[in-house]
Amino acid sequence: MEHNDADQPLLADDSHTHSDAQYESSGVSAEGLGGLFIWALTFAAGISGLLFGYDTGVISATLVSIKTDLSGKLLTTMDKSIITSCTSLFALFASPLAGVYADSIGRKKVLLVADVLFTIGALCQAFTSTVLGMVLGRSLVGLAVGSASMVSSLYISELAPSHLRGRLVTILCLFITAGQVVAYIIGWLFSSTPGDWRWIVGLGAIPAILQLMTLLFLPESPRWLVQAGYIAEAKAVLIKVFGSDSQAGYKASAVLRAIEEDVAAEAAQLSHNKSDSNFQRALRTMAELCSIDGNRRALIIAMMLQGLQQLCGFNSLMYFSATIFESLSFSSPTLTSLTVAGTNFLFTLLAFSLIDCVGRRRILLYSIPFMITALLGCALAFSHLRWVHSVSSPKDGQSQPSSSASSMSVAILICLTVYTAAYASGIGNVPWQQSELFPLSVRSLGSALATATNWGSNFIVGLTFLPMMETLTPRWTFVIYALVCALGWISVWFIYPEMSGMSLEEVKDLLSDGWGVRDSVRRHESRDT
Ligand SMILES: O[C@H]1[C@H](O)[C@@H](O)[C@H](O)[C@@H](O)[C@H]1O
């Protein structure tokens, strides 16, 4: 029997997201929403993930294929580092901006702008004849990746029922890693013919155009519509969400009321200072985020995990694996590097099935030691190799690894595969569960800061990897990544409580007077038995 939730307090728990309260209060069953509409939405958001993955993965094969096609010279280490890392730098700027615009012009329009940027960026890279043009194209793609990664998950979380939202985060990661596999396959197929790298980068325009077309048929988020005063339109969207359900009209009204109350409560919260600019409001939320103990702890955990996800060095493989394998004299570096992308995708699938039952904390504590061992294995193998001193001109005769080194090259490939598998099972996914750490009032700012930490650290790794390999040697580069992982493991041990299976309310209580590690582990273990 349907419960008459329309008469109940709709937002009893402010730690729930809007859609938690909305869907729970409407008495909507999990089964009732598994319709075509939600799948269409997931697919549309998935294209953003695919683009994110494609545009970050594509650089690996591109760098080894450009040769002298840009500015009439071989790319220097600095050229490679800047071409690679400008994408993350612009993504870092774009994600908070996209958050602001998503509120003022709507979620869909931001996605639309992102798709246009993806397309122009891809074409700009495909047709450029200079390093500067390439940097411009990659920067446009960075703006697109930053906005799309932020807004697509927001858009979906406001439409999807709460029971689907957690899994959706990992589904987006699956799309990202699938995009990276596609990029690597295309990179491999097109890297042997001179000049074909233009296809590799240019093809990124296709999913963007596809998403643009999908967007024409998708609705705006009902929450944004209510906020902007389009109540009738919001109701029409909700009726579509409930689809063929016989009580669609009733349920849509209940959810609509929940959203209206939610928006009104938020407005009342801000009403004591209506004249505040967006900036002043952001400052106030920032103060709330940093001065309240529980919020501050949540922010520290979220930023620590996102920083660790990038500073452990994984994306140096994503961006430069073909360069590394070329330097190690593998006959097809782009095909060899497919093992990295493939392993990343397969083990993200594994994480998808394990993350809730094994637990986020436990999965990290188990997987990081494998990453450390594999990184140290790489360092050891590299120290037995005569490393190519200039990775930018690996075929210069005197810089090839000696013949006895080929078994070391295979050892490095194995270590990198183990490292990737361990990364994808844990730290590659867990940090994206960040929104569950924050209460509603500071959720978007907290998530934005954590996401900025991700892109900021990604930028640092992209910019420093090749110079570190050259100046510090590969051995010490990998030892440094192993040290970062060890520090990360210690931090997880001391400050990251086990969040799986907890309601958002429980999370809030847990962090309010301490890190809650022991308490959460005890609870999780008692649930296990
Ligand atoms: O979660 C994703 C995924 O692990 C990708 O493979 C990686 O390239 C991204 O940087 C990360 O955020």
Image (cartoon, rainbow, N blue to C red):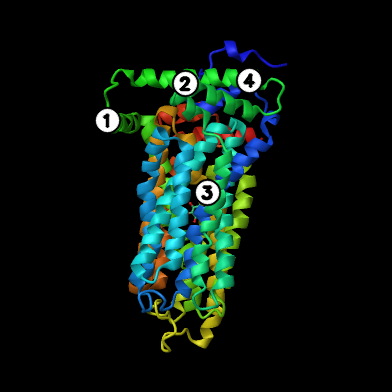
Closer to the N terminus: mark 1 or mark 3?
3
Residue position for label 2 = 262
**Residue type, numbered disc 3:** Ser
| Residue at 55 percent of width and 77 percent of height | 192
Front of the two marks 3 and 2: 3
The image shows residue 529 at horizontal and vertical percentages of: 66, 35
Q: Residue at x 58, y 25 (%)?
A: 236
Instruction: Decide which of 17, 509 is in the foreground and name it.
Output: 17
Q: Which numbered disc, 4 or 2, marks the residue that appears first in the sequence?
A: 4
Residue 442 appears in which quarter of the rendering?
Answer: top left
Identify the secondary structure beneath mark 4.
helix
Residue of label 4:
251
Mark 3 and mark 2 residues within 8 Å of each other at the beta carbon: no
What amino acid is at disc 2? Answer: Asp
Give the Cα distance between marks 1 and 3. 31 Å
- The image quadrant that residue 74 belongs to is bottom left
Mark 1, Cα crowd under 10 Å, few <14 / some 14-19 / many 20+, is few
Residues at badges 4 and 3 in contact (C-beta under 8 Å)? Answer: no
Q: Position of residue 514 (x, y in %)?
A: 41, 32
Question: Mark 4–mark 2 contact, CB under 8 Å?
Answer: no
Q: Any mark on residue 280, and which? A: 1
Q: Residues within 10 Å of mark 3 (few under 14, many from 20)?
A: many
Q: Is residue 317 above or below residue 404?
A: above
